[in-house]
Image (cartoon, rainbow, N blue to C red):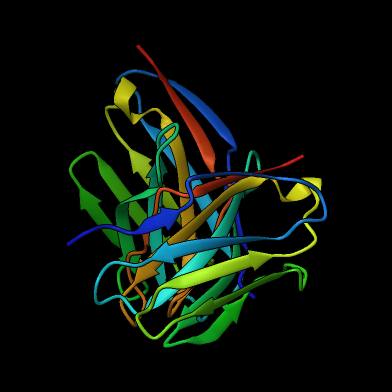
Amino acid sequence: GENVEQHPSTLSVQEGDSAVIKCTYSDSASNYFPWYKQELGKRPQLIIDIRSNVGEKKDQRIAVTLNKTAKHFSLHITETQPEDSAVYFCAASIMSDMRFGAGTRLTVKP
Amino acid sequence: KAGVTQTPRYLIKTRGQQVTLSCSPISGHRSVSWYQQTPGQGLQFLFEYFSETQRNKGNFPGRFSGRQFSNSRSEMNVSTLELGDSALYLCASTEAGAGEQYFGPGTRLTVT
């Protein structure tokens, strides 16, 4: 099955700085790549997603890039704020078979 | 629409026992996936059900099983519980194809 690797496992940034989280996947048939944010004690929630026919997608301070050839995709958060502190998960999906990375704990210091 | 619900929310069991967890998807969603979440391990995929059939399966032992009913509600069962089964079990529902998965609040299982 699909294998998703995510780096780094922890990331600490100063408020206002940018944060980048990177993921690689193994199955070239994967065609849907969501990113989820999980705050402490809460369920994961989708923050942005991208499909394999698109190279980049942006939503306000959040952007995702996809390189199908290299089989990697990244999450970029600009102008980070303390409320961005959470665990972020990337995932790769073939139809409804979705596999997640191990997560990145992002801490934004005020 | 009501969100994904899971029952019970918390459960304490003893080694060797079995447990059944329940998940009710968003109305109209026919796919239900189950995940095990432990600290440092992220979200480990257990299995996915669609129209009462297991469509995909992760790398978990046969002690973990599931089923889906005609109303799309799903249950997962863990037999012969081990201490390492202590985790948060999340279910998520989606419409038939690929797309956003909506997660339930999870069931926190503690095995003593």
Tell me what residue is drawn at x 57 percent, y 31 percent. Answer: A10
Instruction: Answer with the quarter of the image where residue B67 lies.
Output: bottom right
Tell me what residue is drawn at x 27 percent, y 57 percent. Answer: B3
In the picture, the quarter occupied by the N terminus of chain B is bottom left
Q: Position of residue A100 (x, y in %)?
A: 54, 58
In the image: residue A52, left or right of residue A11: left
Tell me what residue is drawn at x 34 percent, y 30 percent. Answer: A84
Residue nearest the viewer, comparing A24 with A88: A88
Residue nearest the viewer, comparing B58 with B83: B83
In the image: residue B96, left or right of residue B15: left
**Residue A74 seen from this side:** yes
User: Where A97 falls versus A64 (above or below)?
Assistant: below
Q: Position of residue B74 (x, y in %)?
A: 47, 72
In the image: residue B83, left or right of residue A20: right
In the picture, the quarter occupied by the C terminus of chain B is top right
Q: Position of residue B86 (x, y in %)?
A: 69, 45
**Residue A69 seen from this side:** no
In the image: residue B107, left or right of residue A52: right
> Exactly how many numbered labels are in the figure?
0
User: Where A90 falls versus B49 (above or below)?
Assistant: above
